[in-house]
Amino acid sequence: MVSTTRTSGGRSSDGQEQDNFARAVDSGIRDVSDRTLQRDLTVVAALRQAGATVGPTTAERDRMRERVLAEFSSVVHEGNSPVLPLRVARRRRWLPDETRGRVVVAAAAALCLTMSLSGMSVLLSRDAVPGDALYTFKRTAESAELGLTFGDQPKALKHLEFAGDRVNEIEIMANQADSAGTWSAGQGKFVRALDDFDSDATAGARLLTGLALHGQPSSLLALRTWAEQQKTRLAVVRAALPTPISSRLDSTLALLDRVVARASGLSNRSNCVTITSGVRDELGLLPAKDACKPAPVDGTSAAVPLPSVPALPAVSPPSAVVPPNLLLRPPSVNPVPVPAQTGSNRSGLTTPRSPGSVLPNPAQPGSEPLRPEPWRPFPAHDSPKPAAPLPPWILQPRLLPPG
């Protein structure tokens, strides 16, 4: 008998019921006190009995197994298995701090080693010639150096520098081939060096002639001097080269002759009105072929006289209007006489003067003394005397009637 426990509420917990059911099924107990558990065990027993009777027999199972194995063997031999490989979930591996630090140090060391090897390769490849293992690395370094050069003039000088290096390589190969006596084995190397020389010389000449036409005529002199030097060096090497290489070298010497002629022609027409003809080739613009007309120089008259302009008559500035100085040149005395007084005012007040009358002059006998005026203070004792005497009279302004 399997006894089940109850909770305080009268119902057994779900976990306990599941444990009791599993224990009863595994042990094969049939008689239990719980009706619900008894019913579940009965269903389990019925399902087991149905599975034993309805399922395939032993012979049927063996037949199906043999058929599956036969199909599997045929698929494996033909190599057309449709079964895809299982995808294994990738898990990120956690690395401790010490391991991570070692990885960083190893990566930094590898980077430093690579940079040091690159620097050593650049140093060792300076003397490399066509056919050497480091010559390709040398040309790559030159291309990178040219790409990092900015400006037409620096680029042109860099092209000429690389062309001079090709002449050095030709001289080295000529000495090596002459001492070993293996001219036929190194003809391809000479041709490669000459091709590179022609390419750099053409690019440098094109840039320098363009700069000369934009206000830098000194570049033509530098280009002509460089071309003459390289021509002299190659002419010395040509005497020691075999016939096939000498024929190829003649085209390079002809290119240098063209560079010298182009620089000389543009330099001779630098003071002309027309310098170039407008036609361009691989070396740049061609010099003009017409007669040279000198260009006008700043500060001198032009080649074509300018029309004369009639000169305008000189106009004297108007004289300034000078106002009269009343202190130095007083006006004439007003000839209007002052009416005589026939009688005195009974009130004892002075008779008011009419507008426009003349004030009394204290210098004349019988005139009234001047009274102090509030707007004109008396001069002090220490004040300087005026340079000119003051006018003996002052005109009283005439009052106009309103309207």
Image: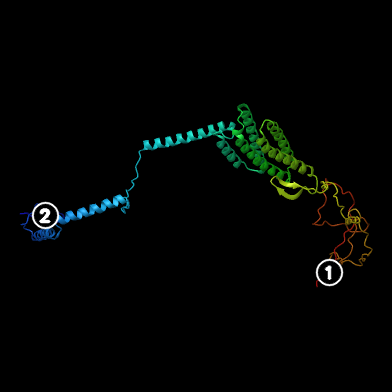
Circle nearer the N terminus (1, 2): 2
In percent of the image, x 64 and y 33: which residue is there? 170
The location of residue 164, given as percent across then percent down, is 66, 35
| Label 2: which secondary element | helix
Residue 376 location, quadrant: bottom right
Q: Residue 315, position in %: x, y?
A: 90, 56
Does residue 154 appear in this view?
A: no
- Amino acid type assigned to the residue bearing label 1 in the image: Leu
| Foreground of the two, 314 or 253 | 253
Quick one: quadrant of the C terminus?
A: bottom right
Badge 1, how many Cα within 10 Å: few under 14, some, many 20+?
A: few
Which residue lies under the disc numbered 1?
Answer: 400
Q: From the viewer's perspective, tell me whether residue 197 is left or right of residue 387.
A: left
Picture quadrant of residue 123: top right
Residue 282 location (% of width, % of height): 69, 46
Quarter placement of the N terminus = bottom left
Reply above or below: 40 against 120.
below
Q: Residue at x 64, y 40 (%)?
A: 195
In the rendered structure, find residue 306 and report the number of the disc placed on it: none
Amino acid type at circle 2 is Val
Q: CA distance from mark 1 to mark 2?
A: 143 Å
4 with respect to 236 (left or right): left
Colour approach in the figure: rainbow
Residue 25: numbered disc:
2
